[in-house]
Image: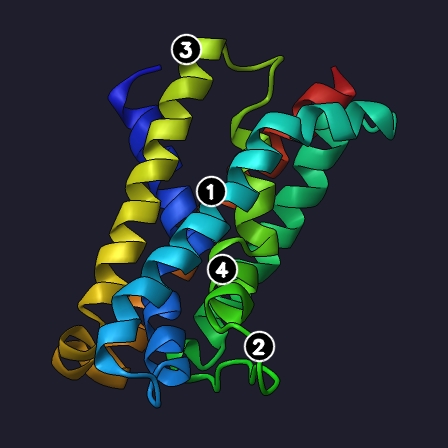
Amino acid sequence: MNFELLFGEFLLLVATIDPIGTLSIFVGVTRRSAKEDRPRIALKATLIGGAVLLAFLILGQFILGALDIRLESFQLAGGIILFLLGLQMVFGVGPAVEPPKPEAGHDVAVFPLAIPSIASPGSILAVVILTDNHRFTILEQAKTSVVLAIVLALTYVLMLLANPIHRLIGETGGTIIVKVMGLILCALATENCVEAVQKLWS
């Protein structure tokens, strides 16, 4: 697996995990939390979200096999969903959208930060597609796991620096970044769909 493929995986995971969007949600749901509690919330959210993604990275192929779903079909469906997610990012309101409201007494690190912000449907689809046993060797899948860890670490660092970053880039800057990542996600999703269709018809 060359650097270009790894960088493509990095962009796909950044687009689906959406660290900037997670940052905005983090600012919203921790506004009333004590300052000293925020690093703990950020770490817990990252670990739980990462654990969910790792579980799908390892077990995704077995789940598809148990359901007798061809990976090409899943790749095509996943590509369509990722494309729609990208369109939503491009034409939606971006990070300025109101974050989900957790119910009283619920741990915000679990919901909405870990799920569905970090371990979103899009990121779950992405890790399953990127670790296809028929397309990638164990070594290549291990490299994908490292890329995933890097994106999760980036998300964690952004949450730690959430308030100063949010003040620096503002809502407009965050929206621009999300729209650019949405455009990239649409392009990557299209490539996945084309590849899946070619395999289904071959």
- Mark in the foreground, 3 or 4: 4
Give the residue type that dot 2 points to: His
**Residue at figure coordinates x 40%, y 27% from the top left:** 144
- Tell me whether the residue at label 2 lies in contact with that at label 4, contact meaning CB atoms closer than 8 angstroms: no
What residue is disc 4 on? Answer: 114
Q: Is residue 61 above or below residue 48?
A: above
As drawn, the label of residue 188 is: 1
Quote the CA–CA distance across marks 2 and 1.
35 Å
Quote the CA–CA distance across marks 2 and 4.
13 Å
As drawn, the label of residue 139 is: 3
- Mark in the foreground, 2 or 3: 2
What residue is disc 2 on? Answer: 106
Residue 179 visible in the picture? no
Quote the CA–CA distance across marks 3 and 4.
27 Å
- Mark in the foreground, 1 or 3: 3
**Residue at figure coordinates x 33%, y 56% from the top left:** 43
Give the residue type that dot 1 points to: Leu
- Residue 190, by quadrant, is top right
Q: Is residue 62 above or below residue 74?
A: above
Q: Earlier in the sequence, mark 2 or mark 1?
A: 2
